[in-house]
Amino acid sequence: MRNYLVDVEIVGATMIYQEGETCRWSLDWLYGNCNRVCVLLDNWNKETEDIVMEYKNRYPDRTRLVYSTDPVIEAKNKISGQIKKRFKNRQHCIRQQVIDELRKMHEEKPIDMLIWPDSDETFIDEFPVYLERFWKSDYDYMMLGFLVVYDSFKLLITQPMAPHGRVYKYKTSLSSIPFRGRTRYDPYYNEKRPFTVRHVVVHMCHFTEEQRKWRKFTCNEDEIADRPRNAWILPKDVRKMTAGEIADYQPGYHQKPPPNQPFPLIDYINNKEKYKKLL
């Protein structure tokens, strides 16, 4: 359990579907850093449900498991791209089911801080430093920037996502309806500017070959082949680096080149033996 913000009731939440072992990255972090965890299973399969039940059985007093009631057409799950399309079209309603459950949890024991990553995300080790700063600040929510790792925690690649909302000082008026882009839920959307930190969320969607194949099917897009990426070999595991150190290996604001220049990811893909000793 965490050794920071020990007097703060931190609740974690995530939504899980059919990603199997990938969801462990998010669940491991949430259970290691949150007092309670709310998990929504939406459009799930048995393999993934079994993993979630493993955590529920291990942490029965800290787990709130919710089964989504949003309709699923099973035949469409077999068609490339349909899983993501359904979620994109319905995500405001699916997310609201989590929010409704969080309100019940708050009535049982007040929630101070909500941390809500996607099920294929984890955080760098320095992240608690920013949580402490955020809690002591006048900001109401955090917008966090992403990192994408490929094959190794020492191989970082470019990523197209802008920062998303991931941490909130909990408010009972929290709502995902109407839809707000980049998870800037109401009422935060219309309030003060967010506490923004880049380079702290590690996105695991391209980490292994299996995950890349699943992502390609789910999205009906080969995000690596269709969007050529650059890569950086880091001096150590990205999770052990600070956000400031990582910034030297990622484009800056307005795509300002970083101090450490990248190389084409395709060169690594085609010459893995060449890079093996560096990873």
Image: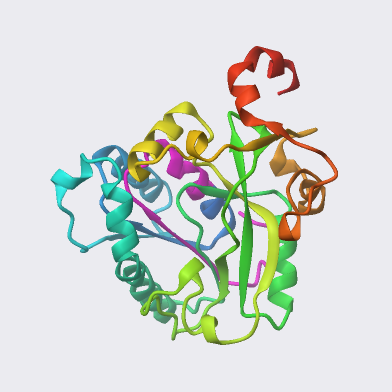
**Quick check: is 271 in the magenta stretch?**
no
Instruction: Residue at 35%, 70% (x, y): give it.
Output: 92
**Quick check: is 5 in the magenta stretch?**
yes
Q: Is residue 123 left or right of residue 70?
A: right
Residue farthest to the top?
273
Q: Which residues are magenta?
A: 1-28
Residue 215 in view here: yes
Instruction: Residue at 29%, 37% (x, y): give it.
Output: 47
Q: Quadrant of the N terminus?
A: bottom right
Residue 4 in view here: no
Quadrant location of residue 176? bottom left
Query: How many numbered marks are there?
Result: 0
Is residue 236 positioned above or below 166 on the image? Answer: above
Give residue 84's position: percent from left, percent from top: 33, 51
Give residue 134's position: percent from left, percent from top: 70, 72
Q: Quadrant of the C terminus?
A: top right
Give residue 170's position: percent from left, percent from top: 53, 78
Is residue 162 positioned above or below 121 on the image? Answer: below
Is residue 190 positioned above or below 197 on the image? Answer: below
Give residue 155's position: percent from left, percent from top: 67, 32
Identify the coloring: rainbow
Residue farthest to the right?
259
Residue 57 vs residue 174, the one in the foreground: 174
Residue 279 vs residue 8, the one in the foreground: 279
Is residue 247 positioned above or below 215 on the image? Answer: below
Q: Is residue 240 left or right of residue 121?
A: right
Residue 220 vs residue 182, the one in the foreground: 220
Instruction: Residue at 70%, 63% (x, y): give it.
Output: 197
Q: Is residue 187 left or right of residue 254?
A: left
Quadrant location of residue 54? top left
